[in-house]
Amino acid sequence: MAYAQAFQAHLLPPEVIDRGLQELANGCPNLRKVALVGATELGLLSLAEECLTLQDLELHKCNNNVLRGITACENLQVLKLVSNVKEFYSSTVSVCWSIIQIRIKINKSINTYYV
């Protein structure tokens, strides 16, 4: 628990992360794979709008609201969630027709689902 609190204390504020994602999206429109820590739904939407070839997305420390932003990633094939996601929006997956693999890691347990 102490490690998680120390990790959280060193994260940038969400608005700074979102601005960084907007810059990344503008500068790398052909981005295919990215891992994000502490992103918000707005930041993920920025990436999805500009990076149309994004296929592999790894989200750390995300909340359920961020998962809604996944629906904008039209070519997403692999989704990795490393977090304490309390519930997974099945509607999110049903809207992302291109997803073929979802990996969820909670604590040290990894579950892989093929859609």
Image: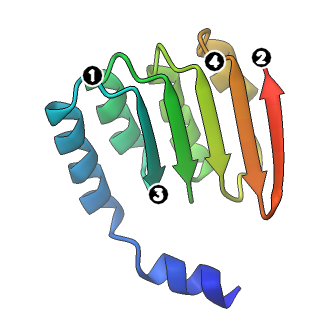
Q: Amino acid at mark 4?
A: Ile
- Dot placed on the residue nearer the N-terminal end, 3 or 1: 1
The answer to whether one can see residue 110 in this image is: yes
Residue depicted at x 62% and y 79%? 4
Q: Kindly report which numbered mark, 1 or 4, lies closer to the viewer in this rendering.
A: 1
Reading the image, the residue beneath label 4 is 99
Q: Position of residue 93 (x, y in %)?
A: 67, 22
Q: Quadrant of the C terminus?
A: top right
Residue depicted at x 30% and y 57%? 17
Q: Amino acid at mark 1?
A: Asn
Looking at the image, residue 107 sits to the left or right of residue 76; the answer is right
Task: Kindly check if marks 3 and 4 are in contact, taking CB atoms under 8 A apart as contact.
Answer: no
Reading the image, the residue beneath label 2 is 115
Q: Kindly report which numbered mark, 3 or 1, lies closer to the viewer in this rendering.
A: 1
Looking at the image, residue 106 sits to the left or right of residue 44; the answer is right
Residue depicted at x 32% and y 33%? 47
Q: Amino acid at mark 3?
A: Val
